[in-house]
Amino acid sequence: MMGNQHYQEVEDRFLAKTYQKIPVLAAKAKGTRIWDAEGKEYLDLMSGYGVAILGHSDDLVISAIKKQLDEIYITHASVYSPTRSRFLQDFMTIAPPSMRSIYLSNSGTEAVEAAIKMAIKATGRQKIVSMERAYHGKTAGALSITHSSKYRKSFQPLLMKDVEFVKFGDTEAIRGALKKGDVAAVFLEPVQGEGGINLPPEGYLQSVRELTEESGTALVVDEIQSGLGRTGKMWAHQHWNIVPDIMTVGKGIGGGIPMGLTVAGKTFAETLEIGEQSSTTGGNPLACAAGSAVVERLRRGYVEMARDNGKYFLQRMEEELGKHRLVSQPRGIGMMLALELRIRFLPVLMNLIDRGIITLYSGINTIRMLPPYILSRDEIDYAVEEMKNVMDRQLNGGGSS
Ligand SMILES: Cc1ncc(COP(=O)(O)O)c(C=O)c1O
């Protein structure tokens, strides 16, 4: 293997410049750790943007993929597959009980596209209500209901024009938006991820459910980031006891093999007909085999692990950083965590990388974390201690370590 610099230079030359790069090269990974080409070790609180929920290179996922590679790894969904059929059955054991059908694709944004089509077709309406600070992906339809202007501005007017954004958490705003009875769907993330780890106020999701029901509007919960145990329950919306009409799933479900799911309840299960949605590689056996392994892990203690470790992580941040002069608020639920700062996140994020800790960010002043659920208490203590060191250093004039 060559040094880090070689690989970075090649990527910088040829990879389309659509990603905000950070100075980390991931050459190898296991569990909560990543190593670069020169052997530097990182503690990974980013987990590939929330994909490595079980930790990197999980043994069960690896053996499921290896076994599948020896059997068959390409099958279009027009052909039946034992592996796909097993995955569908497995997934149904963890799906909310109201769910009846699953459309399989390759990414979160594709799962959202299918949900938009279901809602429009089933209701015969065009308008979508989405939330301020929502993130639902960047394909043309999903981008129409993603809020941030930095993603939207170069493409206005977007393909879907009849979209209204309301404030997340404001019941009156949603009541107003649904008044005319012309809304196909309300899309929301039960806990907003990219928008900064924002929890809904008590009673809000229940009100949205009641109001959408009254107006014949589909309630679509985007669980792409918050689902699969991330918040300490299998699905984040279950903290607030609501029953959605449609749910989108992505990120960790394929154990790192690209996979997206659009899961529909009774009213929407048969909305899309033959040819109205498809994907050449959606539901491929490799993703399905890995998906069954992920479900197996989630059924055997990983959700509780996310709940307990996340609670400990938040508690440690509150204790060590809650009163720090540069911190405005640690917050989160389960392993969906944020540290909102009174300063820009960038120097803090870069200093953490220097010290071997990789995090995410939101907006301009929030450090965001989507760690693997298996993070140990020692690793949490270490991460919080390093965050405190970095914040102290910033307070005393900054500079990298
Ligand atoms: C809530 C939510 N919806 C949709 C997406 C888009 O998923 P993908 O990047 O797999 O297309 C994401 C990705 O971060 C997400 O967090």
Image: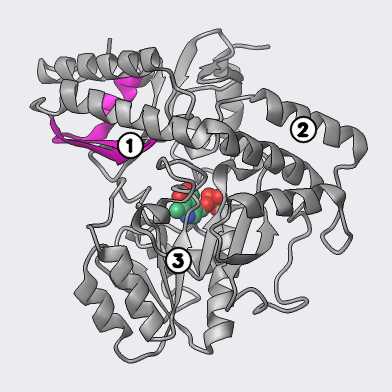
Identify the residue under disc 3: 243
Local crowd at mark 3 within 10 Å, few (<14), some, or many (≥20)? many
Identify the residue under disc 1: 337
- Tell me the distance, in whole angstroms, between the alpha carbons under discs 3 and 2: 32 Å
Q: Position of residue 349 (x, y in %)?
A: 31, 27
Label 1 CB less than 8 angstroms from ligand 1 = no
Q: Nearer the viewer, residue 201 or 66?
A: 201
Circle 1: residue type: Leu
Label 3 CB less than 8 angstroms from ligand 1 = no
Question: Which residue is at a point 82% across and 47% down the rendered structure image?
Answer: 83
Q: Indicate left or right for 181 with 201 as reference.
A: right
Magenta-highlighted residues: 327-352
Q: Quadrant of residue 338?
A: top left
Q: Residue furthest right?
A: 71
Q: Indicate left or right for 163 with 87 as reference.
A: left
- Tell me the distance, in whole angstroms, between the alpha carbons under discs 1 and 2: 30 Å
What colouring method underlies this structural image? one colour
Question: Which residue is at a point 78% across and 42% down the rendered structure image?
Answer: 286
Identify the residue under disc 2: 64
Q: Indicate left or right for 322 with 63 as reference.
A: left
Label 2 CB less than 8 angstroms from ligand 1 = no
Q: Quadrant of residue 204?
A: bottom left
- N-terminal of the two: label 1 or label 3? 3
Kind of element beneath mark 3: loop
* 1 and 2 marks in contact (CB < 8 Å): no
202 relative to 331, above or below: below
- Tell me the distance, in whole angstroms, between the alpha carbons under discs 1 and 3: 25 Å
- Quadrant of the image for the N terminus? top right
Q: Position of residue 181 (x, y in %)?
A: 37, 90
Local crowd at mark 2 within 10 Å, few (<14), some, or many (≥20)? some
Q: Nearer the viewer, mark 3 or mark 2?
A: 3
